[in-house]
């Protein structure tokens, strides 16, 4: 084989590679996207099944009654509801003369509100 044939053969190989590489990359990207969409569809189908189960539960009177008791603290007529306060929690100091809760800080009320809002917005703050 002559040098000229090697150059022509090499040029054709490079031309073929230049034409096929973008097509191959496009095919690969589409396969990746399709796999991602299949995963998303399966996750959504699982979510739909969970929602159907929950809807079936909400159609029963017993579940609705249990949720009303648990979430809204509803009771049937004649029943009594008790709320248990955490016994390990620190009780606030109460002024024996007025019965008012004494504030542990000397901040003005607007700074207490601001710090309370900031603490509520911070998910890492201890509660």
Image (cartoon, rainbow, N blue to C red):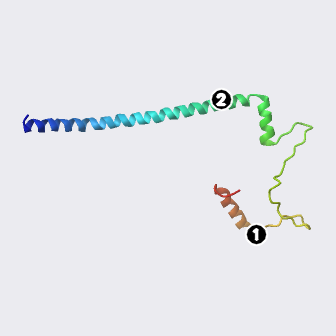
Question: Which residue position holds label 2?
Answer: 52
Residue 101 horizontal side relative to residue 108, left or right = right
What label does residue 120 carry, if any? none
Which class describes the residues within 10 Å of circle 1: few (<14), some (14-19), or many (20+)? Answer: few
Residue 6 horizontal side relative to residue 23, left or right = left
Residue 87 lies in what quarter of the image? bottom right
Task: Depth check: give the residue in front, 53 or 108.
Answer: 53
What label does residue 105 carry, if any? 1
**Residue at 66 percent of width and 58 percent of height:** 125
**Above or below, comparing residue 73 to residue 99 in the picture:** above
**Above or below, comparing residue 54 to residue 99 in the picture:** above
**Residue at 47 percent of width and 36 percent of height:** 36
Residue 69 lies in what quarter of the image? top right
**Residue at 25 percent of width and 36 percent of height:** 19
Disc 1 and disc 2 in contact, CB within 8 angstroms: no
Q: Earlier in the sequence, mark 1 or mark 2?
A: 2
Residue 7 horizontal side relative to residue 103, left or right = left
């Amino acid at each position: 084989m002559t040098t000229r044939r090697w150059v022509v053969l090499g040029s054709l190989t490079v031309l073929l590679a230049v034409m096929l590489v973008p097509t191959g990359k496009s095919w690969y990207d589409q396969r990746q996207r399709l796999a991602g969409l299949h995963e998303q569809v399966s996750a959504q189908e699982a979510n739909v099944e969970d929602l159907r189960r929950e809807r079936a539960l909400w159609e029963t009177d017993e579940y609705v009654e249990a949720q009303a008791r648990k979430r809204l603290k509803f009771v049937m007529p004649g029943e009594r509801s008790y709320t248990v306060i955490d016994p390990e929690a620190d009780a606030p100091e109460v002024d024996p003369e007025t019965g008012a809760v004494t504030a542990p800080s000397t901040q003005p009320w607007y700074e207490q509100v601001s710090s309370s809002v900031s603490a509520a917005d911070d998910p890492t703050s201890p509660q």
